[in-house]
Amino acid sequence: MIAKFDIDYITHPQHNKTLHTHRTDDPVAAEDFLIGLLAIGARVAAIKHEGIELGRPEADRMVSVAAQRLASQMVGISLGLDGAEVKHRFGFAA
C-alpha cells in the first residue's frame, strides 16, 4: 500500500548526499516532519502524495505552512509567549 505522504530528504546536504524517505498517512504528521527538517537545515528533495510528486505550488504551500509554524514556535519560546499572543503580535498562526 502506498503511503499518503512521502518526504524525500537529505539530513546533512553539505556533508552527505544520502537520500532518506519519511512515509506517513497523516497530513499533520507530514507537516510536523517538515518542521523538523526546516529546523535542522535539511534538504527537502521531494514531497509526494500517494506516490506522485507534488507540483511546486502544492509543495511550496506545505513548506510555507511548516515554516510559519516553526517561526511561531521559535518566537513563542524566545519571548515566553503563548500561541494566541504570538498570533496577535506577529501575525503567525498559533
Image (cartoon, helix red, strand yellow):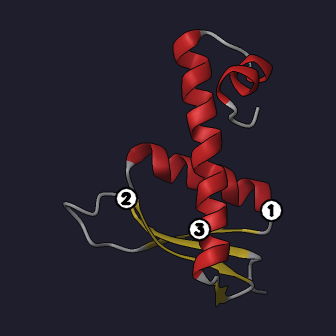
Which amino acid type is shown beneath numbered disc 3? Asp
Q: Quadrant of residue 9?
A: bottom left
Residue 65 shown left or right of residue 16 in the figure: right
Residue 44 shown left or right of residue 81 in the figure: left
> Residue 69 in the image: x percent, y percent?
65, 41
> Residue 21 in the image: x percent, y percent?
53, 72
* Residue at 77%, 76% in the rendered image: 4
Along the viewing direction, whichever of 28 and 62 lies nearer the viewer = 62
Residue 77 shown left or right of residue 81 in the figure: left
Of tags 1 and 3, the one toward the viewer is 3
Q: CA distance from mark 2 to mark 1?
A: 22 Å
Residue denoted by label 3: 60
Is label 2 in a helix, a strand or a loop? loop
> Residue 13 in the image: x percent, y percent?
28, 63
Q: Are marks 2 and 1 in contact (CB under 8 Å)?
A: no
Q: CA distance from mark 1 to mark 3?
A: 18 Å
Of the image marks 2 and 1, the number of the one nearer the N terminus: 2
* The N terminus sits in image quarter: bottom right
Is label 3 in a helix, a strand or a loop? helix
* Residue at 62%, 84% in the rendered image: 55
Q: Quadrant of residue 26?
A: bottom right
Is label 1 in a helix, a strand or a loop? loop
Of the image marks 1 and 3, the number of the one nearer the N terminus: 1
> Residue 94 in the image: x percent, y percent?
76, 32
Residue denoted by label 1: 26
* In the rendered image, the vertical position of residue 82 relative to residue 55, given as above or below: above
Of the image marks 2 and 3, the number of the one nearer the N terminus: 2
* Residue at 48%, 50% in the rendered image: 38
Of tags 2 and 3, the one toward the viewer is 3
Residue denoted by label 2: 11
